[in-house]
Image: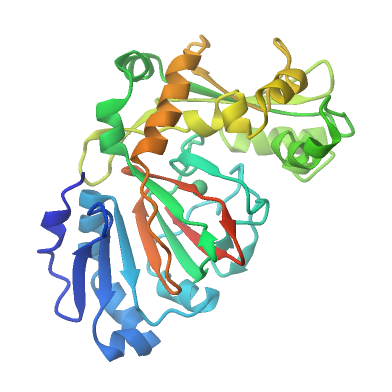
Amino acid sequence: MPEADSVTTLDLGDEVALAPYDPGGWPVIVEARTNRLRQDESHARSWFQEHKAVFDGALASVGALILRSFALSDAQSFSRFIQHYPSMPYGTAGGAAKRSEVADRIYDTVQSRAPTSQIGMHQEMSYLPVYPKQIAFFCHVPATTGGETLIADIRRLERLVSPRLYDGIKKKGIRYVRSTRAPGARVDAPEEHQDYLRLYYQPWSEAYATTDRDQVESKVQAAGQNFEWLPDGGLMTSYTSPGFVTHPLTGRSEWFNSITINHGNYLSADLPPDVYARAFPLGAPKPFDVLFGDGTPLPEDDVLELCRILDSIAVAPRWRQGDLMLLDNTLTAHGGNSWTGPRDILVSLFG
Ligand SMILES: [Fe+2]
């Protein structure tokens, strides 16, 4: 577990109480105690701004914090609350998730998700050259059941992951490969999976919002990726990254990659094994895949074990309306649980 005890001594003043999340002791909850912090939005905002350096230090130590009972009511107040954080240089462009901006710098998290879906654990946009350093999630409406934003401590993962995979990535890095299909091309899969496949294996005209190949190429190159037009009219892009990153505050090298959600297997695709094998037979392009940086395959057993480890160490803090969860994107992976009832969880990414 991270060093939660060290955070309970942090100097956030006496307007808040600090407590480790129960059960499990992680993440740390920062609860507003005074009526001013609970009811006066502009006071809550100034308090949060004044303590930014303390929050940055705390996040670099524990990786995840939940602010509870602050005067935060909706997307607009969430947006005003986080304006002193640096924004991402390109917003969410290039990310695999479909998002819409519901307030300045605030995005919804569920546009392309069915309530029954699970989002695998990942470090946000770690498959791209530019990624957020920190993330804030805000609970506008909690689900009736489930719907937690799952979190996992990367330093715990680093102690559990197979040395073969860890050392292989340290040595060779990681290559992310994405294929988008030719506009109009059909995937060989039962009808009930076609809606999902329209999002999972997009036509490049939708992924890049243009039918002009030159424009697609400019966008891909601007994102620092290599590309290749395929004989069937599809497009394959790739990006090679170290798979580890030096944390800007601690100076430590940490595991930072998206193997579990980008690897070409049925688990990351959220499809039955036989449907995946029929839709993406051996040798055909896969919508998403991850290889070692030298182009050799990752051992599939190690990847499946990695998924299991992340699931086993994931923590599911129960959302309360108005909660704000701050994550260090290097030290903490996140994912999403399925849910019932309404659910509105919003997100902002910090550069
Ligand atoms: Fe995410």
Of residues 63 and 170, the one drawn nearer to the viewer in this rendering:
63
- Residue 286 location (% of width, % of height): 68, 22
- Residue 3 location (% of width, % of height): 16, 49
- Residue 242 location (% of width, % of height): 40, 25
On the picture, is 13 further left or further right than 314? left
- The quarter of the picture where residue 238 lies is top right
Q: Which residue: 73% across, 14% down? A: 281
**Quadrant containing the N terminus in the rendered view:** top left
- Residue 160 location (% of width, % of height): 28, 27
Residue 328 visible, this orientation? yes
- Residue that lies at the very extreme toward the right in this rendered image: 184
Q: Name above or below for residue 292 compared with residue 306.
A: above
- The quarter of the picture where residue 187 lies is top right
Q: Name above or below for residue 31 compared with residue 200.
A: below
Q: Which residue: 42% across, 30% down? A: 308
Residue 226 visible, this orientation? no
Of residues 102 and 164, the one drawn nearer to the viewer in this rendering:
164
Q: How is the image coloured?
A: rainbow
Tally the numbered discs.
0
